[in-house]
Image: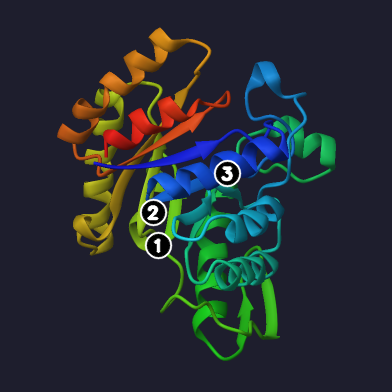
């Protein structure tokens, strides 16, 4: 199983810079941040946090080998043409190491606070589907004219193109049936939180196989990944979470993202790397 790391955006910038650099130096495959304007945890939504894509651009220079990504961007936050342009910029800054993450979003309070429309779940899933259609066109076509349900482009240009051909790997987070259909059509990598345990993850993984069959896609074309939150301040809980990795792997998980909610020690990072 591949192991990558994700660090909470409430850490100070010096902490984040040190941790991203350390993860890169140890040899982790990828390092991630996330896309929220408020703290993503319900009991910590007032925590000060940084903006994900700005941070990703900075960390693209800090790390020199690891792949980088935002796990995941909320489709409601930005026009997809703007997001496509941002992603190309980060792909170039990183020398072609971007994983492009996107999802339907879920944090209603930050939408309300920022005056961003928060449609129903079904509408947000449809927005992801259409946004990815637009983004892929911008990344691969000379100019794009598109008239959809949510987005309209007129002779839109996106130059330069991504360094990665045909485009950065697309990572989609989601679990519900409609989103699994979007994942089957568009994703190179699927990610799902693993807090409900390996069996729940495995059941959704099986449903994704069915969605791939319905979409005419080979299930093996989509890398399967999960995400576990680690709280270094609670070492016994860390032990319990890490002990679950073999069961996730047995159920088909190829890649585990370990999301740190408090800054880890170098010893803990080394322990996690040894699991790869």
Residue 60 screen position, x and y as percent: 59, 59
172 sits left or right of 108 in the view: left
- Whether pointer 3 and pointer 1 mark residues with C-beta atoms closer than 8 Å, the reply is no
Q: What is the image's colouring?
A: rainbow
Residue under the image location 24 percent in, 32 percent down: 202
Q: Residue at x 59, y 50 (%)?
A: 73
Q: Which residue is mark 1?
A: 186
Mark 3 crowd level (few <14, some 14–19, many ≥20, 10 Å Cα):
many
In this rendering, position of residue 151 left or right of residue 224: right
Task: Name the N-terminal-most of marks 3 and 2.
Answer: 3
Q: Secondary structure at mark 1?
A: helix
Q: In which quarter of the view is residue 254 placed?
A: top left
Residue 183: mark in rendering? 2
Q: Position of residue 111 (x, y in %)?
A: 75, 39
| Rendered image quadrant of residue 20 | top right
* Marks 3, 2: nearer the viewer: 3
């Amino acid at each position: 199983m591949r192991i990558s790391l994700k660090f909470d955006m409430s850490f100070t910038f010096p902490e984040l810079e040190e941790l991203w650099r350390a993860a890169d130096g140890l040899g982790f495959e990828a390092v991630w941040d996330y896309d929220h304007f408020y703290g993503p945890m319900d009991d910590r939504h007032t925590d000060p946090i940084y903006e994900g894509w700005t941070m990703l651009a900075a960390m693209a220079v800090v790390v020199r080998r690891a792949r980088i990504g935002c796990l995941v961007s909320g489709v409601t936050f930005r026009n997809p043409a703007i997001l496509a342009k941002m992603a190309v910029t980060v792909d170039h800054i990183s020398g072609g190491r971007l994983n492009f993450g996107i999802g339907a979003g879920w944090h209603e309070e930050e939408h309300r606070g920022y005056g961003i429309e928060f449609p129903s779940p079904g509408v947000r899933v449809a927005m992801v589907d259409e946004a990815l259609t637009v983004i892929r066109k911008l990344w691969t076509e000379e100019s794009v004219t598109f008239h959809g349900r949510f987005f309209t482009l007129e002779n839109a240009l996106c130059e330069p193109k991504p360094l990665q051909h045909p485009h950065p790997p697309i990572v989609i987070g989601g679990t519900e049936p409609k989103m699994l259909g979007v994942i089957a059509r568009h994703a190179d990598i699927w990610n799902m939180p693993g807090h409900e345990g390996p069996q729940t993850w495995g059941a959704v993984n099986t449903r994704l196989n069915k969605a791939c069959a319905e979409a005419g896609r080979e299930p093996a074309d989509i890398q399967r990944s999960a995400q576990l939150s680690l709280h270094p301040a609670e070492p016994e809980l860390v032990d319990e979470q890490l002990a679950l990795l073999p069961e996730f792997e047995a159920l088909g998980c190829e890649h585990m993202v370990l999301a740190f909610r408090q800054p880890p020690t170098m010893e803990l990072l080394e322990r996690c790397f040894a699991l790869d």
